[in-house]
Image: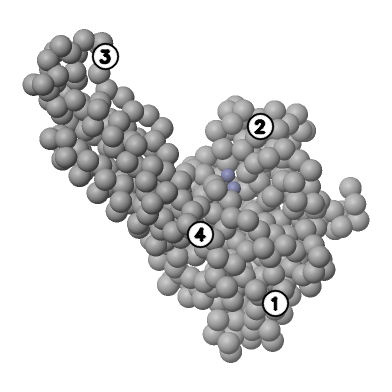
Amino acid sequence: MSVEEAKYSDVVEWRRDLHAHPELQFDVHRTASLVAARLRDFGCDEVATEIGRTGVVGIIHGKKRTSGRVIGLRADMDALPIEELTGAPWASKTNGVMHACGHDGHTAMLLGAARELAQTREFDGTAAVVFQPAEEGGGGGKAMVDAGLMERFGINEIYAMHTEPGLPIGQFATASGPMAASADGFRIKVEGKGAHGASPHVSVDPLVVGANILLALQTIVSRNVHPRKCAVVTVGFLNGGKAGNVIPQWAEMGGTTRTFDPAVRDLVEARLCAIAEKVAEAYGATAVVRYRRMYPPTVNHARETEFAVSVARTLVGDAKVNDKLEPLMGSEDFAFMLEERPGNIMLIGNGDTASVHDARYDFNDEAIPFGIAYFRNIVERGLPL
Ligand SMILES: [Zn+2]
Ligand SMILES: [Zn+2]
């Protein structure tokens, strides 16, 4: 254990305890009650639980409150349905569930920062530490926003952090604008007219219609989306029929779309629906489209990102903070909070480890001092006395 780690040995213990007791989605009852108990121990001015089912918020007022401003700091608490293979002494005690995305580390670091902020209170305004459930599917961030998170605690801007395997310890990375993609899903049900395979003239073949829709959908990216923007439209299945000599009544396809720009997301949805319905109509069939918006793109705001980068650079030096990160194709639930308030999500180096969502991934405790200092400085520099 390094000197810095020793200084944070109790935070390391919290992290390993959280790691050993992972919980899924909204069912983070043990984690949420531990978080709430610690926040009360630290002397937070208010600790609110059950925000968006199992979310927790701690409120810490600074020495002064003349600015009237509130900075939100957010961590996620949930784990993944993965059987752990790290072999660590603190490995999951729950079969088939593990912290493979570092949310144990995010939660421990934000607790560490909350303790320091509650001890020192060297800021003018209020810090709101936000612990959300259900980041890995389930929309826990949206649940907290829908429960009035921003209004109830008067949050003006909000910041989050995420572990990044492959990025060295003590380094940070982010970007202004898109950071992670939207993730939406769709189903298209085509109804034609079934017939004997030998009598195609009396049928409306839903397989031929479905195949034409599938090909036409390829033109959304190649012909509709601006060449310098990007999008993904993937059809993952096309099913219909069972016998070689029967033209079926129905065919169904489904897939996923990814975008980085809210306007491109709207365009993709509109074109997908129009193409499916109109191609079907052209062949005398009907298509019913179910388009489900799941995660919006995660878009960092310019001013808050510039500030977050300057905070990280003051801690570790200019060269160790990449402010031009390429957007990630995955999606991030913090997007719902960034739709409501300006803010930033920052990646924090986890060193040379297995990637997130891998059964051998483990949050690197050496990152803890950097994460705590970063969160603390966001508040102290963002709300100067
Ligand atoms: Zn994840
Ligand atoms: Zn994650």
**Distance CA(mark 2)–CA(mark 4):** 36 Å
Spot occupied by residue 58 in the image (x, y as percentages of width and height): 57, 65
- Snapshot colouring: one colour
First-in-chain label (1 vs 3): 3
Tell which circle, 4 or 3, labels the residue nearer the N-terminal end. Answer: 4
Residue extending farthest right? 3
Classify 146 as above or below 95.
Answer: below
Amino acid at pointer 2: Ala
Q: Which mark is residue 228?
A: 4
User: In screen coordinates, is 8 left or right of 280?
Assistant: right
State the SS at label 2. Answer: loop
Judging from the image, what secondary structure is the residue with disc 3 in?
loop
Earlier-in-chain disc, 1 versus 2: 2
Q: Residue furthest bottom?
A: 66
> Considering only order in the chain, which callout, 2 or 3, is on the residue closer to the N terminus?
3
Residue type at numbered disc 3: Lys
Tell me what residue is drawn at x 42 percent, y 72 percent: 151
- Which is more foreground, mark 1 or mark 2? 2
Identify the mark at residue 242; answer none if there is no mark: 3
Q: Is mark 1 within 8 Å of ligand 2?
A: no
Residue picked out by circle 1: 380
Q: Which residue is mark 2?
A: 359
At label 1, the amino acid type is Glu
3 or 2: mark nearer the eye: 3
> Residue at (72%, 73%) from the top-left corner?
310
Distance between the Cα atoms at labels 1 and 4?
39 Å
Q: How many angstroms separate mark 4 from mark 3 (CA)?
A: 42 Å
Residue 191 locus on image (x, y percent): 17, 31
